[in-house]
Amino acid sequence: GGGILSRHASVTLKTTIIQLNHAKKYGGGMYSIGSSIQLKSSKLTLNEANDGAGIYLIGGSNNKPSQLEDSDDKSVILNNNASRYGGNLMIDTLDCKKENNNKDGCLSHEGCQWNKKPNVLDINKWQGTCMLNREASSTKIKNLLILDGVANEGGGVCINNADVSMINCEISANYARKYGGGLSLLKDSTATTYKGLTITLNIAEFNGGGMIMRRNSQFNNTYGGETIIDRNVAWISGG
């Protein structure tokens, strides 16, 4: 979180500009775990990171989803540059096993569950492991305008192992140095659109100008509104 770090919080950014921040790993502009973020007439721009240069969004559960929303249709995420994944936005699931080694710490994170299993050294004793509850993990993005992001993969948005609801969003004019100019769905990711989604004028140097889907990923457009994938370009295949 080069600019802002948010953990299980409610954040409102009103007439705020988050720009020219840098993170060596994740979330140049903002790194968020299990938080609800509202943008009002705000802009995230010219941030840099390894992954999720604009925003790196993690975690959440079905009861309390991680959420990113433009509440007045006047905000924009643009011109952020990631060296790997998710130029403007990276959406991921929490690495529960890495984050926590005790039950209280585990359960403090929405979307994690504490699993008990026999101790390998003593079968009469039990040990616990913090694991991701994959079926309960949920993220929502709403009314977002995502422009001119750059990354190796997922110039606009990259989703990794996450279940994401995309509500009335536009992903335009982003650029991937390799795959998925507009949107990249990595392994085991699901994106479901509501009230329309536009993916347009994005470019990938290799494959998937508008969108690329990896193994076991799903894209669902079943809940009203049109999905428009228009005038994207890939230099090799899947424009």
Image: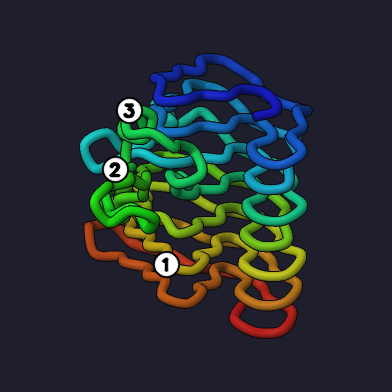
| Kind of residue at disc 3 | Asp
Q: Residue at x 41, y 41 (%)?
A: 59
Q: Name the residue under label 1.
A: 188
Earlier sequence position, callout 3 versus callout 1: 3
Question: Of circles 3 and 1, which is in front?
Answer: 3
Question: Of circles 1 and 2, which is in front?
Answer: 2
Quadrant of the frame with the C terminus: bottom right
Earlier sequence position, callout 3 versus callout 2: 3
Locate residue 6, reporting x and y percent: 51, 24
**Label 1 to label 2: alpha-carbon separation:** 22 Å
Report which quarter residue 135 is drawn in: bottom left
Q: Do the residues labelled 3 and 2 touch (CB within 8 Å)?
A: no
Q: Residue 86 carries which label?
A: none
Looking at the image, which is closer to me, 155 or 15?
Answer: 155
Colour pattern of the rendering: rainbow
Locate residue 58, reporting x and y percent: 47, 41
Q: Is residue 232 above or below residue 53?
A: below
Q: Which residue is drawn at 41% across and 75% down?
A: 216
Q: Which residue is drawn at 50% across and 28% down?
A: 74
Earlier sequence position, callout 1 versus callout 2: 2
Looking at the image, which is closer to me, 220 or 74?
Answer: 220
Q: Residue at x 53, y 30 (%)?
A: 75
**Label 3 to label 2: alpha-carbon separation:** 9 Å
Locate residue 199, reporting x and y percent: 51, 60
Q: Residues within 10 Å of mark 2 (few under 14, many from 20)?
A: many
- Quick one: SS at disc 1? loop
Q: Name the residue under label 3.
A: 104
Q: Which mark is residue 114?
A: 2
